Image (cartoon, rainbow, N blue to C red):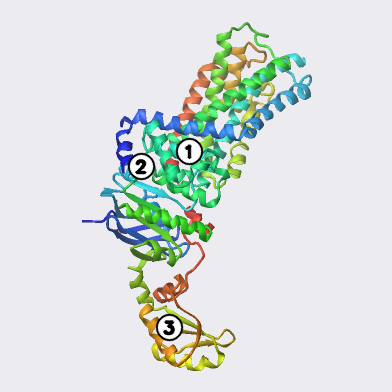
């Protein structure tokens, strides 16, 4: 049985640009798939195809058991979409925004009002509920946008770069909200440019580049494939640098690089946390005092470099329809 | 979650027409709330035609020939139907800009992802614009009366005919907002929509009987003016208001201006609503 979000061979072309070049996805019910890729990779186009906003040239998609092309209206009843921009009417208050969305989900005025109040409370917007959204901070607008996507508690949610442009504190806050949501059993597809975000929120990650899914798996699986993990050590005494380099060279996957002026050594590793404690024991055993040690995880660039052989491009190449990705 | 079941139970019946009307009203209400929060927009929409009334009355009045006279009082009575009609068509720019703004802000995407009637976003916009046009027209009529415009100065008329004239003006304005809707969906920015929504209106409203007597134009221009849908509304209003300068042209729209206005308006709505809704359904914000 296909998952709550299922796509097979999605193709979408804008002029000469193949935004989607045969995308297959399968998201089991109640799980989170992170669609990871640089700007212009096709993430937004994929979301737009799955949420009935865009008709793919070829391929098939099923969301919440409903055929996206055949039953678009039924699909719309079962999904919530939170886009890249906080798509709220800035001249309406938070309450008016949510009430309007509820009514357009075909709720009657009264329950829509009650639901709006409930969501404003839940998203910590109750104090600002009767102010125009224009006066909200970026984080508050995103929360309002997310609340709008949740008005009918849809079983399937799509979030297109939900935290792009947010400061770290607001990003953290939004992550908490999303985690809570997912723990309630919602199936979620979220797109992101940040591996860290996918790591934090998603069960599975699909890496997208040039309109194709080039790798899929759990974050650990992807990182293992990437092999971009590194251990960084800062020794207390400069004299210990070469001894430490020898230790790291022995335990790591290659030669340690040394940044003399910072007393810092970096070595590629596999084995993550377990190896980290081994390195600490070994250094300790030789009387090498350290100021800092850490496991540096692969970045999106590392994952990309290893999967595609090219660095993540930042140019939007998704065609005229979605200047959005490029606009970031 | 209890709210889910509540929401489902609160579902509105599935009749398509009921749903379409209801969704349009929800969107219209939203646009009206917006207008009250940006009163300066409404205000500018009123100031501009008021300025036209004053400028045309005092600058052109006395030098433009209506029938066989250049009497400024006659020109004043002649002019108002033209200014009223031009004003209602200028609502096009507001619709175009509003819809382009919704596209740019991602609101159209949100609406399109909701299980709502397909035409409701555009209908809600045009209906709200119609309400704004009505307010503008009311203020304008009062200003016109203040500068000396009177009905029944050339032919007798009655309140019913005068109201019918304003009704036709609103219908024309409503029809033109659908052209605006299509423009708004076709351009990339609200700024482009504002100019794109208004530029073409200058030839449409000036190559007409609105500000000068079209019978005095060069023949080819006069033909255009006589068949211009906009001229039909102006002619209809002059007739219904009992104002001077009713064209004696043989052209069918000039002979049957009320029917012509009704037909033109319905035709414009039918064509542009179809095109705009189709565009909206495929719109990529």
* Residue for badge 3: A268
* Residue for badge 1: A95
* Residue for badge 2: A152
- On the question of residue B209 being in view, the answer is no
Q: Using a 10 Å C-alpha cutoff, classify the residue at mark 1 as few (fewer than 14 neighbours), some (14 to 19) or many (20 or more).
A: many
Q: Label 3 is found on which chain of the structure?
A: A
Q: Quadrant of the N terminus of chain A?
A: bottom left
Q: Nearer the viewer, residue B230 or B118?
A: B118
In the rendering, at what x and y percent does residue A259 appear?
55, 86
Q: Label 1 is found on which chain of the structure?
A: A
When the figure is inspected, residue B49 is found, relative to residue B152, above or below; the finding is below
SS type, badge 1: helix
Q: Earlier in the sequence, mark 3 or mark 1?
A: 1
- On the question of residue A22 being in view, the answer is yes
Q: CA distance from mark 3 to mark 2?
A: 48 Å
Q: CA distance from mark 3 to mark 1?
A: 52 Å
Horizontal placement of A108 versus B42: left or right? left
When the figure is inspected, residue B77 is found, relative to residue A114, above or below; the finding is above
Q: Are marks 3 and 1 in contact (CB under 8 Å)?
A: no
Q: Mark number for residue B79?
A: none
Residue A283, quarter of the rendered image: bottom left
Q: Nearer the viewer, residue B144 or A140?
A: A140
């Amino acid at each position: 049985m296909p998952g709550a979000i299922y796509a097979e061979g999605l193709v979408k072309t804008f002029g000469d640009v193949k935004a989607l070049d045969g995308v297959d996805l399968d998201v089991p019910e109640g799980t989170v798939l992170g669609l990871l890729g640089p700007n212009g990779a096709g993430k937004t186009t994929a979301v737009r195809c799955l949420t009935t906003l865009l008709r793919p040239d070829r391929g098939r998609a099923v969301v919440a058991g409903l055929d996206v092309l055949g039953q678009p209206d039924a699909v719309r009843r079962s999904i919530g979409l939170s886009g890249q921009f906080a798509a709220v009417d800035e001249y309406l208050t938070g309450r008016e925004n949510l009430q309007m969305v509820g009514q357009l989900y075909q709720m009657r005025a009264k329950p829509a009002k009650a639901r709006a109040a409930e969501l404003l409370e839940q998203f910590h917007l109750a104090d600002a509920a009767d102010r125009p959204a224009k006066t909200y901070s970026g984080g508050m607008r995103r929360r309002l946008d997310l609340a709008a996507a949740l008005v009918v508690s849809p079983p399937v949610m799509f979030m297109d770069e939900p935290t792009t442009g947010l400061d770290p504190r607001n990003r953290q806050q939004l992550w908490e909200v999303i985690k809570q949501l997912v723990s309630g059993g919602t199936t979620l597809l979220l797109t992101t440019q940040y591996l860290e975000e996918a790591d934090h929120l998603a069960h599975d990650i699909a890496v997208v580049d040039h309109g194709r899914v080039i790798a899929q798996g759990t974050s650990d699986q992807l990182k293992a494939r990437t092999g971009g993990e590194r251990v960084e050590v800062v020794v207390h005494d400069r004299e210990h640098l070469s001894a430490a380099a020898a230790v790291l060279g022995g335990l790591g996957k290659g030669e340690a690089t040394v940044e003399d002026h910072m007393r810092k050594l970096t070595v590629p590793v596999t084995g993550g946390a377990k190896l980290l404690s081994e390195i600490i024991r070994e250094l300790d055993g030789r009387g090498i005092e350290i100021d800092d040690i850490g496991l540096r995880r692969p970045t999106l660039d590392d994952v990309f470099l290893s999967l595609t052989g090219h660095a993540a491009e930042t140019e939007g190449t998704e065609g005229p329809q979605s200047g959005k990705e490029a606009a970031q | 979650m209890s709210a889910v079941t509540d929401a489902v139970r609160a579902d509105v019946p599935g009749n398509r027409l009921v749903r379409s009307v209801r969704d349009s009203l929800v969107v219209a209400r939203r646009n009206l709330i917006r207008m009250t929060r940006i009163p300066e927009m409404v205000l500018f929409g009123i100031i501009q035609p008021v300025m036209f009334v004053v400028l045309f009355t005092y600058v052109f009045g006395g030098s433009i020939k209506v029938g066989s006279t250049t009497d400024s009082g006659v020109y004043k009575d002649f002019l108002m139907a033209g200014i009223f009609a031009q004003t209602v068509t200028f609502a096009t720019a507001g619709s175009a800009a509003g819809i382009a703004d919704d596209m740019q802000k991602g609101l159209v995407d949100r609406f399109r992802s909701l299980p709502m009637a397909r035409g409701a976003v555009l209908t809600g916009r045009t209906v709200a614009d119609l309400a704004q046009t009505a307010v503008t027209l009311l203020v304008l009529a009062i200003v016109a009366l203040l500068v000396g415009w009177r009905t029944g100065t050339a032919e007798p008329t009655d309140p019913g005919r005068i109201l019918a004239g304003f009704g036709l003006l609103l219908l024309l304005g409503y029809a033109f907002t659908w052209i605006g809707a299509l423009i708004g969906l076709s351009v990339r920015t609200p700024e482009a929509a504002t100019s794109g929504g208004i530029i073409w209106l200058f030839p449409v409203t000036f190559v007409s009987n609105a500000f000068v007597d079209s019978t005095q134009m060069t023949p080819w221009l006069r033909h255009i003016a006589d068949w211009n849908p906009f001229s039909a509304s102006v002619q209809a209003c002059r007739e219904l208001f009992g104002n001077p300068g009713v064209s004696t042209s043989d052209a069918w729209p000039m002979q049957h201006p009320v029917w012509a206005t009704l037909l033109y308006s319905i035709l414009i709505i039918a064509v542009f609503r179809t095109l705009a809704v189709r565009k909206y359904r495929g719109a990529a914000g």
